[in-house]
């Protein structure tokens, strides 16, 4: 069996932009990463309302097949119980850390009995453009994360907040090394946690996300359609 096709990404620094074919090796999904314990409890509570068991500790790092990462315009999911959530993406590309944005699209029905399996159920869309972490690290807390969901034909603001609400990269990477002694290696990617959903977690026919840098006046984002496949048997 051959390897998956590499992701076609764009590395965009202040000085230049260049394309790269990136073969992801490992994908980590960081969960329960809020700095504000009250905000994190709010997210735990909204998932608990759906039947999701609270985490054993925070943060947690779920392993997901790297082949789930995609820059496709459409993903296919089983049934109507899945939904997206905007997350910062950290990527180690040839030893340099880069920052992007993606969606940890998750099957919420499966999540009620096994979070790890639920995260493996769906593709993880991401924007193709990434910035050098070194260019945004000093003003990390100013970066803004938003998502939008198309529900019943209406586009609504689904998530909104600054990255000051979540653990910064140095903390996440240090916590990961406690679980994985080698840390985030070249070829590895990590999704860094999410913000509470405005109005609660719910499914959508389209999902969009954006990472905005008001200090450097730039942004990156993506949107994708969700095609629902029938559940039979």
Image (cartoon, rainbow, N blue to C red):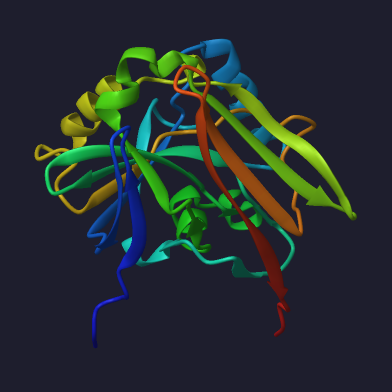
Q: Quadrant of the N terminus?
A: bottom left
Residue toward you, 9 or 184: 9
Q: Residue at x 35, y 64 (%)?
A: 7
Q: Residue at x 33, y 61 (%)?
A: 66
Q: Position of residue 40 (x, y in %)?
A: 55, 21
Residue sitting nearer the eye, 218 or 86: 218
Residue 122 in percent (x, y) is at 53, 62
Query: Which of these two is toward me, 199 or 149?
Result: 149
**Residue 65 in sight from this viewpoint:** no
Occupied quadrant, residue 172: top left
Pinpoint residue 82: horizontal percent, then vertical percent. Answer: 66, 56
Quadrant in which the C terminus is drawn: bottom right
Question: 79 or 171, which is in the foreground?
Answer: 171
Query: In the rendered view, does 50 fall on the left or right side of 57?
Result: right
Residue occupying the point 25% across, 55% down: 26
Residue 114 visible to an observer of this rendering: yes
Question: Viewed as shown, does residue 2 lie left or right of 5?
Answer: left
- The extreme bottom residue here reads 1
Q: Residue at (14%, 45%) from the top-left corner?
A: 185
| In the depicted structure, whether residue 38 falls above or below residue 180 | above
Q: Is residue 39 above or below residue 199?
A: above
Q: Is residue 143 left or right of residue 89?
A: right
The x, y position of residue 79, in whole percent, is 71, 68
């Amino acid at each position: 069996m051959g390897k998956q096709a590499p992701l076609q990404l764009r590395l965009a620094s202040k000085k230049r932009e260049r394309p790269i074919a990136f073969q992801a090796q490992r994908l980590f999904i960081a969960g329960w990463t809020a700095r504000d314990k009250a905000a994190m409890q709010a997210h735990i509570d909204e998932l608990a309302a759906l039947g999701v068991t609270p985490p054993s500790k925070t943060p947690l790092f779920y392993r997901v097949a790297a082949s789930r990462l995609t820059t496709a315009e459409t993903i296919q999911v089983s049934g109507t119980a899945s939904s997206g959530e905007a997350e910062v993406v950290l990527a180690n590309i040839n030893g340099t850390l880069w920052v992007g944005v993606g969606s940890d699209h998750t099957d919420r029905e499966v999540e009620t009995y096994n979070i790890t399996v639920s995260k493996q159920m769906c593709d993880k869309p991401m924007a193709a453009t990434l910035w050098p972490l070194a260019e945004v690290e000093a003003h990390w807390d100013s970066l803004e994360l938003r998502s939008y969901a198309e529900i019943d034909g209406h586009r609504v603001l689904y998530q909104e907040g600054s990255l000051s609400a979540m653990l910064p990269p140095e903390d996440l990477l240090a916590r990961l090394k406690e679980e994985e002694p080698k840390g985030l290696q070249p070829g590895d990617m990590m999704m860094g946690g999410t913000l509470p959903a405005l109005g609660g977690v719910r499914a959508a026919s389209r999902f969009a996300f954006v990472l905005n840098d008001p200090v450097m006046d730039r942004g990156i984002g993506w949107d994708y359609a969700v095609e629902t496949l029938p559940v039979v048997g």
